[in-house]
Image (cartoon, coloured by chain):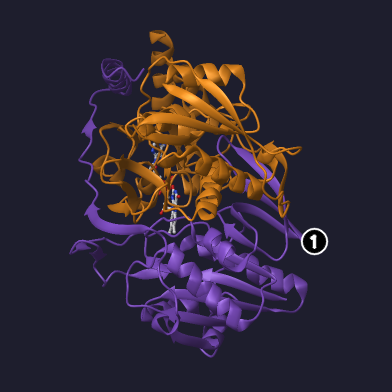
Chain colours: A purple, B orange
Amino acid sequence: MRIYVCIKQVPDSEAIIKIVGDTEYNREVVYVVNPYDEYGVEEAVRLKENNGDGEVIAVCVGGEGAVSALRTVMAMGVDRSVLVKTGEQFVGSDLTAQALAWVIEQEGPADIIFAGKQSMDSEGMQTPYRLGAQIGLPVVSNVVNFSLEKTTALVQREMGGGLRESLTVKTPCIIGANKGLNEPRYPKMHAILKAKKKEIKVLDIAELTIQDNSGVQLKGLHPAEDRSEARILEGTAEEAVSSLVDILAEQRII
Amino acid sequence: MSKIGVFIEIVDQALGKSVPGVVGAACRGGDVVGFVLDDLADKDRELLEEYGVTEVVVVGGREVALSELPVSAGLALADAVKASGVKALLGVSSSTGNDLLTRAALSLQAPLVLDCTGIDFNTNCVRKSHFSGKATATLQLTAAPFVCGIRPNSFDPVPEKVACTITKFEYAGPIDDAITVTGVEKSGSGRKDLAEADIIITGGRPIGSSENFKILEECADTIDAAIGASRAAVDAGYAPHSMQVGLTGKIVSPKLYIGCGLSGSVQHFAGMKSSKLIVGINTDKDAPIFSKSDYGIIGDLFEVVPLLTRQLQKRR
Ligand SMILES: Cc1cc2nc3c(=O)[nH]c(=O)nc-3n(C[C@H](O)[C@H](O)[C@H](O)COP(=O)(O)OP(=O)(O)OC[C@H]3O[C@@H](n4cnc5c(N)ncnc54)[C@H](O)[C@@H]3O)c2cc1C
């Protein structure tokens, strides 16, 4: 069984983002594995473990530093990795999907592919779908429950209003993982050490004959306005609540 | 005048509550044409007529229910959009909306941006969050038609009473059953949808148990609010993930957000910082939530929330 996981490295959620020029940000932030991708990794590794054999391959499009994200997921149980190196901070989902498809073509056909449902930096939400279009596999994203039968996957997606949609998907397929799918493991020391010896193939995105056909251009990045200090409603709890209710009524919220 | 398409999402057998807001966004760009899968109920058509939708295309799929076949539904929506000549297709950036809009955009080979919070039809530029709300990106769509998902509550509905004509679009393409919807089930509270609510009351870790959410529910009932939870509360098993707000939960922008026993982590704020008014209730006067909210009450949520419930009940 050949299982792929798509990995992106993104700034840590605690990172302070400073916009540089029109469309870039401070490169010195701390990077982590995109949190949604971790659910994909965990599901892939469990699938291999339950299956008894197979290989889990991580594929990443990112900067040179993304090697550390790949070491992290290999410590979680991924067997080997391929990094498609790029100098750009933002690679659109169209180009990313083409690069992922290119690697998958090289490494052999997938039995199943996991990805995160979205990345935390550009929040595009499109990569799993675009990869599916590239390699002709069905895609379900926002998945919180997954099990595999002979030729189908049974999945559940999270909808609004506490609804869950159940679907059957013909395999091979692509799964966009959401939180709730599983509890990603913390790698143990020996797994971290072992991961240092696992293979990472590196190739440059320029070696691939691909171009961006998305029709979407990033024109500018702007820092979000910070919210200011709260006005503390004084007095006893009763009085504070009373002021709050007055304010809400005044602003016609209630 | 150009025409702008809106995917009409039906949620739990009724018009999605965020659809009128998306129609409000679309009408800035031209006459609004709705696209709905399979069927449109009279009550939903009447609602659309309140908001200026002059035409609805019912996209039907021969013998099958398209809403149960996402792959074909995306192809069918794309074909209907192409045939209609709309300049753009908009829809709610919900789970279903994002799924279908993406499938349709890929079939149309159209530029696609999801979760937009702003749109300008003159420049064909949209705005969306980057880095979970720490930055906003301006993106330009360089071909037409283009496809945009709109974050719920980003645009106000614009009431304008019109008559709406219904036309049918018969999908003639392949019926692809690679993905089949087999059912929909309720998990969690079954309360109002977080993403669509005007008011949200959220409980953090100190809520302590799933039973204690009742305190928030009683309060929510007085003001028709939805209930949220922090990740700490979800991971402790007090609430299902469907109630989680934040970086790895739901993104919400209600008119009022009341956080009860929330520290105010960046990851939680990533999901609710675009709320119009934020109120924090916390025992610790130095809690970070007070440095980025509109109003704060320093106090124990188990005392403050029931008081709030009582005062709200009195007002009604
Ligand atoms: C990758 C990643 C993703 C994450 N995603 C999310 C996410 O989506 N959503 C999310 O919420 N978090 C998320 N987190 C977790 C986040 O960092 C915080 O740990 C979490 O939000 C804290 O939850 P809390 O505020 O409920 O609890 P705490 O941090 O424990 O804060 C509780 C607060 O309640 C106050 N308090 C205690 N008792 C009372 C009382 N009786 N009455 C009133 N106040 C009281 C305390 O003073 C304290 O400020 C994420 C973290 C990471 C690393």
Disc 1 element: loop
- In the rendered structure, the answer to whether residue B165 lies left or right of residue B70 reads left
Q: Please provide percent x and percent y for residue B25.
A: 36, 33
Amino acid found under the numbered disc labelled 1: Glu
Q: Residues within 10 Å of mark 1 (few under 14, many from 20)?
A: few
Who's the residue at 51% across and 41% down the image?
B81
Q: Is residue A26 above or below residue A147?
A: below
Task: Determine the residue located farthest toward the right in the rendered image.
Answer: A150
Per the image, the residue denoted by label 1 is: A149
For the question of whether residue A115 can be seen, the reply is: yes
Q: Nearer the viewer, residue B310 or A179?
A: A179
- In the rendered structure, the answer to whether residue A91 lies left or right of residue A145 reads left
Q: Nearer the viewer, residue B23 or B54?
A: B54
For the question of whether residue A184 can be seen, the reply is: no
Q: Please provide percent x and percent y for residue A60.
A: 48, 75
Q: Is residue B241 above or below residue A172?
A: above
Q: Please provide percent x and percent y for residue B271.
A: 40, 45
Who's the residue at 44% across and 60% down the image?
A119
Q: Is residue B278 above or below residue B230?
A: above
Q: Nearer the viewer, residue A93 or B239?
A: A93
Q: Quadrant of the C terminus of chain B?
A: top left
Who's the residue at 43% across and 85% down the image?
A207
Kindly identify which chain the residue marked by label 1 belongs to: A
Who's the residue at 53% across and 77% down the image?
A102
